[in-house]
Amino acid sequence: MWKYVTRRLLWMIVTSISVAILIFTVMYFVPGDPAQMALGTEATAEELNAYREMLGLNDSFLVQLGKYLYNTFIRFDFGTSYAYHTPVMEEFASRLPRTLALGWICLIIDALIGIPLGVTCALHRNSIWDQGFLVLAMVGVSIPNFWLALLMVMLFTNKLHLLPSFGIGTWKHWVMPIIAGSLSGVAMNARQTRSAVLETIRADFVTTAKAKGVKAHDVTYKHMLPNALIPIVGGIGQRFGSAIAGTVVIETVFSFPGIGTYMMNGITARDYPVVRSCVLVLALFAAVATLLTDLAYGFIDPRIKAQYVNYAAKKRREDQA
Amino acid sequence: MEQNENFLQVRDLVVEYTSGGQVVHAVNGVSLSLDRGQTLGLVGETGAGKTTIAKAILDILPNPPAKVRSGEILVDGQDILKLSEHEKLKIRGNKIAMIFQDPMTALNPVMSVGEQITEAVLLHNDFTRTQAEARTVEMLEMVGIPGQRYVEFPHQFSGGMKQRVVIAMALACDPELLLADEPTTALDVTIQAQVLEMINDLKTKLNTSMILITHDLGVVAETCDNVAVIYAGKIVEFGTKRDLFKAPAHPYTLGLFDSLPKMDDDSKELHPIPGLPPDPTNLPRGCSFHPRCPRATEACSREGEIPMIELSPGHFCRCIRTGGNN
């Protein structure tokens, strides 16, 4: 098992370096001049050139790439933002926790509301509640979150003056971003759970559990749900990875000072270090999320765990041979 | 059939399924009784309603679509169908336990086998967890599985071993009635005998009554005291094993025996019962078997219930053509 995890972690390093090279190359060839952006249209050619020289942008592609990789992966220095003039690492230290908190609170709410809702619908399938909920879930999935965010701002900020529409500071600042960020997730979790539970509802082992005298509630949550979890966890895992990426839109709407706004501003300002670091961190989180999801599968289903273990054992045998 | 000291009595049980707007008549007025320590065989074709009867006794039919329309199921004189859900939970797995047909799917794939048995033990006994686990190990060893396999999962067991686990689970709380739904059908012939023998031994040891559902007359001959032959959700013949094997009376029972291969018969052909079991949404009038019956007359398809006729004490047959001339 540990062999498997170690292998996956090593692969993650390879993935990160590839992502770093790719994003560096893309940003290198994307039109737009950071110097022009920073100094404005009034700047003379000499000024621009001096600025570029200072940032090391006049070096050849390979030299720049080499420096970038060395700084990022050996010195763990993400560089200094062209626009903010602060080290990217410093900004991350304050922004990343906020973004992660926002993303993961949404994720937890998705699971805590979505899964029981889905189970309830599955148990009362085809009832009026179930049908009504399915329609609502469809609406929930289809509503774009920025639109919902704007509607909420109109209602809670402009009309009722209950919640602030931007910034951060009190718990009130978090309410609307969290609602806007979790609605579609709740709906998706609920739909996924509903169909996954419906698949186990007729399973023989459920009848066995009932025949043992297990309470209906325990039959559902101890026997049916664990067997239905794989697709649900898969969905959550995907959103776990994109928790930071997924909040970009919401952060922008609410001017929430997280990674999302940082990246958006970085892209408009051609702030290479910021964009590169954000993308790299996104990729890392996606990779970690995938690994955690796979490990969660093994934890949920012993048959999958057996595959990991067998895989490691087989590998060992091959290595010895 | 009307003795009151009987441990289990089923009276006029009617179970229907609703499927796609149509009503499936799965069980149509079944009455049977069972003494303590005895084994009753339920024999019949696939879809005759055998499993439905067993599940109705535990009241674990999926509802909807299944529904017990009428009838009584008395265990020790207590009508199970009238109990509260809470009281039913205490009976299921405790007083009445069931062994399911397909061991491959009857166990929860993500729970260790030991845990699945312990769950039942804990539900019905005032045991601590340690005591319950000890009991589970004891049960596993009783069915011939080493106790250290407690922590293993169903996918690590073969089909025969899984069926042993299912049996251990059913017997873990010393049930007074065991419902065995084709316990050997999914198993290899070599394992079948072992499993049957094991069930028989355990049953004798614990003085458990059993309803054995099967379509295998060989299994009936080995294990049962009484036999009920089911056709289209009705008992068409009931008697002791001796009655049934020595003097089968109902044309359907005769057909079942005829369809077995015979060692002393040189002809290479089997003699199956012609036709198919009737459509349970639209049962034939009169005797449900008359469209396939070689002895059917016009009277057989007349509207109305065919009565049970007592041919000899304890041997009943639901056929208007027997009785007099048999």
Image (cartoon, coloured by chain):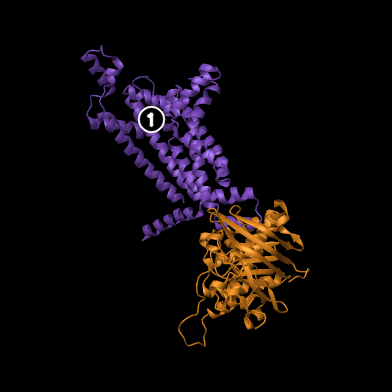
Place residue A112 in its image quadrant: top right
> x, y percentage for residue B131?
69, 57
Q: Is residue B250 above or below residue B117?
A: below
Q: Is residue A201 left or right of residue B237?
A: left
Q: Which chain hosts label 1? A: A
Which shade is chain B?
orange
- Which residue reaches farthest top? A42
The image shows residue B252 at horizontal and vertical percentages of 58, 75
Q: Residue at x 60, y 73 (%)?
A: B300
Chain A, colour shown: purple
Can I make out residue B172 in this image? no
Q: Quadrant of the C terminus of chain A?
A: bottom left
Judged left or right of residue A201, residue B179 is: right
Foreground residue, B211 or B326?
B326
Dot 1 crowding, Cα within 10 Å, few <14, some 14–19, many 20+? many
Whether residue B38 is visible, yes or no, is yes
Q: Is residue B165 above or below residue A302?
A: below
Residue B186 at what x, y percent from top left? Answer: 53, 68
Q: Position of residue A116 (x, y in %)?
A: 57, 41
- The residue closer to the viewer here, A261 or B104, is B104
In front: B150, or B45?
Answer: B45
**Could you say which is closer to the camera, residue A175 or residue B77?**
B77
Q: Which residue is mark 1?
A: A278
Secondary-structure class at tag 1: helix
Q: Residue at left 76%, top 63%? A: B76
Which residue corresponds to the image point at 53% horizontal and 36% vertical from the top-left?
A108
**Residue at screen point 52% across, 18% down:** A157
Q: Is residue B84 left or right of residue A37?
A: right
Give the residue type that dot 1 points to.
Cys
